[in-house]
């Protein structure tokens, strides 16, 4: 699952169209869009609204640790050409002097630069930084729900020393995002891929749902049951049908757990097929 | 290899930092105030980060030399470790670093001279004792040598303190930086070894065992002191055959009479570290198998542990006297 957080409707439009997202009716607090394994929320301007939007969307979709988050928006820079796309290598909050460093776990050859989040539009650009108004709020909120590797900020240069922020219009913002859809698509694929990896690892064991219906497990026992079943799956010890056959005579949940534990004991580590080639 | 380098901003003028930055001209550089800002935050996933770790250049402060765990001892009366690096480029599934640190980024502490001052302090505290210093506790001592130039700085230092020992612990087969020097008599190049089958399945990105043995042989022939580390021993199907074969091959390549030490220990981890690693790799057979907790440590069931350990000890005794074999079993 990948969630986009975008400040303005005009910035969001190209992404909504590109990923064929549909407006969720009946949501009043924010404009919310949904599509296949993707969600988009229009936060409004500023870091506080960005943080609120992340929290709202996380609650709405019951976000998991495996949910990926991408903030897309416009930013200013002293010298970079208008339309240049930049991935944030560092996010700094000018007001609270806090820094975050989104880890990059995928190949990204395009530009990466530090981003400074300010509370009002900035016209004096300090060298090296991008200036914008949402990233720190977005990141600080998203990091509460997900893991840092799945949270990124992508900014497109909308103003610089030659072309001040007063020149930026909703239409120009839309055009700038539109021109960077390839990069946004690539980022979205990389984040979705990693999100999928974590999601798959967090899935309950194959037989879990079936067994919790057959016996009464406490919440702690359910957790233990799932772990035991996953270990048996990983070890490739038994087929699902063999497990159910062996357990069917048992009366109590505790007996089921004991029987599964016995299956694991004294199982030697069997090597996986070769992984990456040794150097 | 490295596409992002974080560096503590006040270290930018440091010559060691400058050299490393020059070595990676295409790496993206990000300044930070303190390495912990990048390395320590809670919401990080070691498994995901291991796909593309960054390098962090930092200054180590606080305790630079620490007492080594008792099971690390290889004959010295005092044992300490120091970590000029955290994490390593290899990806061994049993490695405790995965559960120890939140981040898989490599941290290189460039203030080597401060480490040496701290080592000198320890030496002066125990002037009459044989002190061992271990450099490969939180990293692989040699795997990053081409970047760190660790040996160039530390070998002459230890050479000038002949009553102390430096253990370099490694899985690297790149030993040219040792071979190009006169052997340092109080330095032990200690190599971790495992059966080829375990190497291929659990020691991702490491050199093959045969490559390591070739390097060990070359070093021993040129006069370096060698240690062999069979730790962790992994219980696997036909463990007896696998380890018997490994020991046989190792002692075909290495002159046991000139060997400094052998250490032997079974797979074991502190419980919180084991649990973190299992959470990161729920699909890993090594963690799914029979593991039990005893006194805060997770390892194989006692009977099984005893059986495997005794077998390996007996096999090793065919090649090397007992006084050169050190146990990593926790008592």
Image: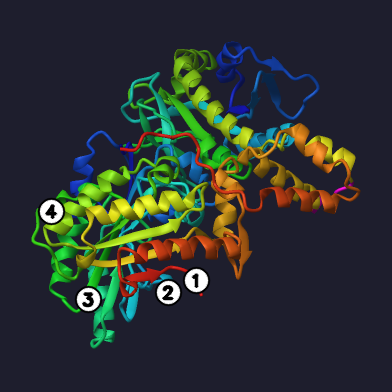
Which residue is tagged 3?
A: B164
Q: Position of residue B109 (x, y in %)?
A: 30, 58
Q: Position of residue B223 (x, y in %)?
A: 12, 62
Give the CA separation, mark 3 to mark 4: 21 Å
Q: Is residue B292 magenta?
A: no
* Residue at 39% across, 54% down: B244
Which quadrant is the C terminus of chain A positioned in? top left
Give the CA separation, mark 4 to mark 1: 35 Å
Q: Tell me, for residue B330, which label it has, or none.
A: 1
The local crowd at label 3, few if under 14, some if 14 to 19, many if 20 or more residues have their Cα within 10 Å, is: many
| Towards the viewer: B128 or A2 | B128
Q: Residue furthest front?
A: B318
Q: Assess whether mark 1 and mark 2 are in contact (beta carbons under 8 angstroms).
A: yes
Q: Chain of mark 2?
A: B
Frontmost of labels 2 and 1 is: 1
Which residue is tagged 4?
A: B179
């Amino acid at each position: 699952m990948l969630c986009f957080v975008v400040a303005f409707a005009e910035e969001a439009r190209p992404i909504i169209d590109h990923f064929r997202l549909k407006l969720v009716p009946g949501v009043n607090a924010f404009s919310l869009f949904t599509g296949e394994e993707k969600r988009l929320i229009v936060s409004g301007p500023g870091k506080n609204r960005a943080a609120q939007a992340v929290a709202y969307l996380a609650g709405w979709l019951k976000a998991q640790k495996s949910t990926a988050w991408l903030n897309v928006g416009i930013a200013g820079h002293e010298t970079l050409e208008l339309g240049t796309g930049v991935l944030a290598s560092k996010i700094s909050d000018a007001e609270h002097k806090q820094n975050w460093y989104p880890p990059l776990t995928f190949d990204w050859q395009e530009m990466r630069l530090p981003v400074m989040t300010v509370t009002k539009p900035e016209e004096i650009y300090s060298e090296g930084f991008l200036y914008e108004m949402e990233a720190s709020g977005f990141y600080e909120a998203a990091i509460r729900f997900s893991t840092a590797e799945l949270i990124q900020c992508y900014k497109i240069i909308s103003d610089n020393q030659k072309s001040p922020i007063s020149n930026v219009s909703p239409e120009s913002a839309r055009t700038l995002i539109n021109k960077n859809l390839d990069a946004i698509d690539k980022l979205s694929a990389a984040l979705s891929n990693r999100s999928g990896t974590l999601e798959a690892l967090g899935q309950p064991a194959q037989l879990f749902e079936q067994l919790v219906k057959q016996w009464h497990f406490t919440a702690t026992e359910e957790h233990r049951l799932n772990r035991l079943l996953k270990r048996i799956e990983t070890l490739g010890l038994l087929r699902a049908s063999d497990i159910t056959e062996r357990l069917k005579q048992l009366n109590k949940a505790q007996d089921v757990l004991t029987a599964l534990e016995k299956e694991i004991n004294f199982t030697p580590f069997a090597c996986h097929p070769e992984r990456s080639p040794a150097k | 290899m490295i596409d992002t380098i974080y560096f503590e901003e006040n270290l930018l003028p440091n010559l060691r930092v400058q050299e490393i930055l020059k070595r990676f001209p295409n790496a993206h550089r990000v300044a930070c105030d303190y390495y912990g800002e990048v390395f320590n935050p809670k919401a990080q996933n070691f498994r995901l980060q291991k796909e593309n770790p960054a390098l962090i250049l930092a200054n180590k402060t606080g305790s630079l030399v620490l007492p080594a765990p008792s099971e690390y001892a290889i004959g010295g009366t005092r044992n300490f470790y120091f970590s000029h690096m955290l994490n390593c480029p290899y990806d061994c599934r049993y490695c405790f670093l995965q559960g120890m640190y939140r981040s898989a980024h490599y941290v290189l502490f460039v203030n080597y001279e401060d480490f040496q001052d701290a080592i000198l302090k320890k030496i002066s505290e125990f002037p009459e004792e044989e002190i061992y210093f271990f450099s490969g506790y939180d990293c692989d001592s040699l795997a990053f040598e081409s970047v760190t130039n660790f040996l160039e700085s530390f070998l002459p230092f230890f050479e000038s303190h002949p009553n102390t020992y430096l253990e370099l612990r490694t899985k690297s087969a790149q030993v040219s930086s040792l071979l190009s020097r006169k052997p340092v008599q109080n330095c032990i190049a200690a190599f971790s070894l495992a059966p080829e089958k375990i190497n291929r399945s659990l020691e991702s990105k490491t050199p093959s065992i045969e490559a390591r043995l070739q390097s060990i042989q070359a070093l021993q022939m040129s006069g370096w002191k060698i240690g062999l580390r069979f730790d962790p021993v992994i219980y696997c199907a036909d463990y007896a055959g696998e380890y018997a074969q490994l020991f046989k091959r190792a002692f075909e390549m290495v002159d046991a009479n000139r060997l400094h030490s052998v250490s032997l220990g079974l797979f074991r981890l502190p419980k919180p570290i084991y649990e973190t690693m299992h959470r990161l790799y729920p699909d890993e057979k090594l963690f799914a198998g029979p593991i039990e907790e005893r006194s805060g440590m997770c390892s194989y069931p006692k009977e099984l542990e005893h059986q495997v350990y005794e077998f390996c000890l007996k096999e090793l005794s065919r090649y090397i006297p007992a006084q050169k074999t050190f146990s990593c079993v926790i008592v």
